[in-house]
Image (spheres, grey):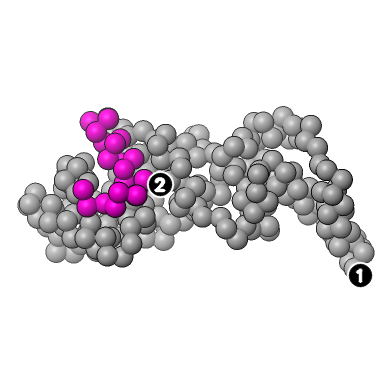
Amino acid sequence: MIEFSNDEKIQMFDEIASHFFDRNFGSFSKSDFDLLMFHFYINKMNASPNHANYNICSDYSISKELGITQQRVRNLKIKENLIYPRSNYDWKKEFAALVKNARFDDNKIKISISDPNLYIEIENYLEERGNYIEKNLNSKLMTIRIEYFIDLCLLFEDEKSKKQVIKEIKKQCKNADADIKHFDDNNVGKSLIETTANVTSIIANVASCFSPCNVIADSLIALIKKFT
């Protein structure tokens, strides 16, 4: 069972009391109280109170300790992130830390993401550009077309190097006799699908254009080499 120090208990009580003893007694619902207690719990499980790394807090282990279903744990994780957001949360860095565990199959990247909030951030980023992820029966498994994954790689490039990578991608498309007349630099993945070019070959040829510190691109290139 998780244990709190006396100082932590004092801080927790003060926060709970603020929802009852400031002309607001009875306005704090049972679900709100459950969420606040879950917030305390998640913060305690992580080294930093400003950064809940849900990848090390599995739904299964939490469900066993709290005596609730794994689905309820996932719902609480999502709601806790909305009500008690962490200012220093960077979903791109969280994603980068997981890519090394991905697999490449049938021109798709498959990666297990246990943090539902990270999953939502990635899905939203792609959908805002008219792209998509493929749904699976396993809600933690994310399947992304390799073309869309390139857009995620470009997130880790500064503006100058990003333009250079895109320029080289278009050059490789031309070399492959692909039509790039309607190529959209702001939506590289979708544009590559429309060119019908061999994307794995293009990535291999532009690999050197990515920044050395771009762990997403490095992982993608390594995956292609390993599984093709």
Quadrant placement of the C terminus: top left
Q: Quarter of the image holding residue 218? A: top left
Q: Is residue 141 visible?
A: no
Residue at 43% x, 46% y: name it.
96
Element assignment for label 1: loop
In the displayed structure, does residue 73 sit left or right of residue 17?
left
In the displayed structure, does residue 82 sit left or right of residue 102?
right
In the displayed structure, does residue 15 sit left or right of residue 128?
right
Magenta region includes residue 222: yes
Q: Nearer the viewer, residue 207 or 82?
A: 207
Name the amino acid type tagged 1: Arg
Residue 45, given in percent of the width and then of the height, sits at 69, 41
In the image, which residues are magenta? Answer: 208-228
Q: CA distance from mark 2 to mark 1?
A: 47 Å
Q: Which residue is mark 1?
A: 23
Magenta region includes residue 63: no
Quadrant placement of the N terminus: top right
In the displayed structure, does residue 62 sit left or right of residue 155?
right
Name the amino acid type tagged 2: Ile
Residue at 70% x, 44% y: name it.
42
Residue at 37% x, 60% y: name it.
129
- Check the image and name the residue furthest to the bottom: 23
Residue 204, given in percent of the width and then of the height, sits at 19, 42
Q: Which residue is mark 2?
A: 133
- Say if 218 sits above or below 62 in the image: below
Element assignment for label 2: loop
